[in-house]
Amino acid sequence: MEVNNLKNQLKNISQSGWIPTYRSNSTGAVGHTLEYSLGIAENNLQIADCGDYELKAQNVRLEARTLTTLVHCEPMPVGTVKWLLANFGWAHESRVSEQSFRQTININGTDRGFVVSVNDDRVNVNFNEEFIAQTHWQWKSQIIQKTYKYAVPYWEHDTLRSKLQNKLKNTVHATAVSKTINGIEHFKYVDYVLYEGFDYDLFLQQINEGNVYVDFDARTKHNHGTKFRIKPNCIGNLYKHQEQII
């Protein structure tokens, strides 16, 4: 989609007022509704939504407690998530017979001892049992009794740069307010910012500042995918240029 056409369509969506949600009871409803309003078919492709432009949308009501997904990208070596689940998993909160490995990790680390780091060749997720919080003492006692060799999940810079560049070369970030009308959530899109010129070095800088996270979400019978995510108010820090559309 040509950028001026995209801008005009977004302005028209804002002027149309309250729009009923396209997908109920979903944290991604605000984004799905915007895509639907633009006539974009739902997909899981690792390319931008509108030609050279990716769409990201945020509900003001959820902004303070949600992160924005940048890209899905499984770590190397192949099978790492399955291995992490088997060796570091804990009981799933609702599925009695399943294990869970859900961690949202940045450079400051988590209370289970996982931490993101950047070196010359890779982005890594390291583990140090000394940083496990006392609240997880039972889990800690279980994992240290196992015989395992820790395999560091990693993403080589060339691979990660390519995925991010293909998906996020340019991005439109939309902000919406929401309210319930006749029992149905509605959105009004009140702000759009156009970001252009994704820069991988700026992405690494955001990792080192603690604003980018690696998000694992796996359980015994399903891996929901590994994602790189960012604080919504830091998306602009990944780009060389920005423009306020409305």
Image (cartoon, grey):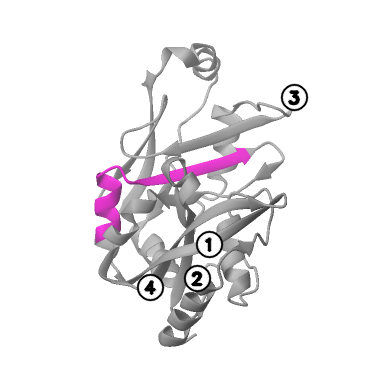
How would you rate the neighbour count of disc 2 (Cα within 10 Å): few for under 14, some for 14-19, many for 20 or more?
A: some
Q: Relative to 50, is 63 above or below? A: above
Residue drawn at the location 55% of the way across and 53% of the way down: 178
Q: Relative to 172, is 85 above or below? A: above
User: Residue 45, position in %: x, y?
Assistant: 58, 68
Q: Are marks 4 and 3 in contact (CB under 8 Å)?
A: no
Q: Quadrant of the C terminus?
A: bottom left
Q: Nearer the viewer, mark 1 or mark 3?
A: 1
Q: Which residue is mark 4?
A: 170
User: Residue 126, position in %: x, y?
Assistant: 37, 36
Q: Amino acid at mark 3?
A: Val
User: Residue 61, position in %: x, y?
Assistant: 49, 46
Q: Which mark is residue 96?
A: 3
Q: Amino acid at mark 2?
A: Ser
Label 4 to label 3: alpha-carbon separation: 43 Å
Q: Are marks 1 and 3 in contact (CB under 8 Å)?
A: no
Q: Amino acid at mark 4?
A: Asn
The stretch of residues the image draws in magenta is: 202-218
Q: Name the element at disc 4.
A: strand
Label 1 to label 3: alpha-carbon separation: 40 Å
Q: Which mark is residue 188?
A: 1
Residue drawn at the location 46% of the way across and 76% of the way down: 11
Label 2 to label 3: alpha-carbon separation: 45 Å
The answer to whether residue 120 shows anywhere in this view is no
